[in-house]
């Protein structure tokens, strides 16, 4: 159930508190409610995951040691589901490694118990002002060619294209710059991590091999050589 104060002293933030200790949960919900926030509380990771996916929240306050999904698994699952609301970890696990693992899992802030409510309130206000992160980009598409950025696979007309790791990096770079001419130097720097010209035909060889996989047997041609300039991947006019 939600609780909301009548006061309007500060910007109201819609918060989901995920805490299995009853006294701590009541303290958080009541205190945040008194400050004018819209607050809901759940006691397990499983319930939190379902609630946070079904409803939009401005902020999650997450205890790491909760039943079901622990706090880290919960936040990872939410990020994988494209739920990018800010997360404040509130936990007794206060070691440096604990804080680092929480932030790497997708947390935005970390407060160790016991805590001063005034500090929690200030952190809530700061996170509530933060603009919502954009959904993570998971694929790129040009015409009927698509790559999956998570599985690092490519398909054209829904048919899989077998690519070597370097060929995938080359295709991804071309697709991120679709419609633009990319030079040999740009490809050496961004695909091969070379900041000098090795005086080999490594770029030409890989582009030729990639073109045979992406264009041959499909049509129309997507990868073009721009004489004297470089290469361009573009959709047909």
Image (tube, rainbow, N blue to C red):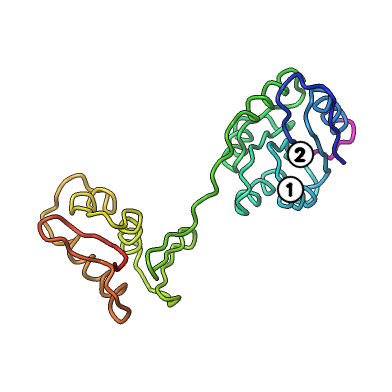
Residue under the point 74% across and 17% down = 118
Image quarter in which the C terminus is found = bottom left
Residue drawn at the location 72% of the way across and 23% of the way down: 120
Q: Quick one: quadrant of the N terminus?
A: top right
Question: Badge 1 is on which residue?
Answer: 55
User: Residue 126 occupies which quadrant of the picture?
Assistant: top right
Give the residue displayed 69% in from the left and 27% down from the top: 124
- Mark 2–mark 1 distance (CA, rounded to whole Å): 10 Å
2 or 1: tag closer to the N-terminus: 2
Seen as rendered, the residue at the extreme bottom is 217
Looking at the picture, how far across and down is residue 117, in whole percent?
77, 20
- 213 horizontally vs 132: left or right: left
Determine whether 98 is above or below 154 in the image: above
Task: Tell me the number on the disc at residue 7.
Answer: none
- Whole-percent x, y for residue 68 in the image: 78, 51
Which-is-in-front pick, marks 2 and 1?
1
Numbered disc 2: secondary structure: strand
> In the rendered image, which residue does mark 2 sit on?
16
């Amino acid at each position: 159930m939600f609780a909301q104060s009548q006061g309007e002293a500060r910007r109201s933030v819609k918060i989901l508190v995920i805490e299995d200790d009853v006294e701590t949960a009541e303290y958080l919900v009541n205190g945040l409610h008194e400050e004018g926030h819209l607050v809901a509380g759940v006691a397990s990771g499983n319930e939190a995951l379902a609630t946070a996916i079904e409803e939009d929240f401005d902020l999650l306050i997450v205890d790491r040691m909760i039943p079901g999904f622990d706090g880290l698994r919960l936040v990872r699952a939410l990020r994988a589901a494209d739920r990018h609301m800010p997360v404040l970890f509130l936990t007794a696990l206060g070691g440096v490694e604990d804080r680092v693992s929480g932030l790497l899992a997708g947390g935005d802030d970390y407060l160790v118990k016991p805590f001063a409510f005034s500090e929690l309130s200030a952190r809530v206000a700061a996170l509530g002002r933060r603009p919502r992160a954009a959904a993570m980009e998971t694929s790129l598409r040009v015409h009927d060619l698509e790559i999956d950025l998570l599985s690092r696979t490519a398909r054209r007309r829904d048919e899989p294209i077998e690519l070597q790791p370097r060929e995938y990096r080359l295709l991804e770079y071309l697709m991120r710059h679709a419609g633009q001419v990319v030079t040999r130097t740009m490809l050496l720097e961004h695909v091969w991590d070379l900041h000098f010209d090795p005086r080999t035909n490594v770029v030409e060889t890989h582009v030729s091999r990639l073109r045979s996989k992406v264009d041959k047997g499909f049509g129309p041609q997507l990868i073009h050589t721009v004489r004297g300039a470089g290469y361009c991947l573009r959709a047909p006019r």
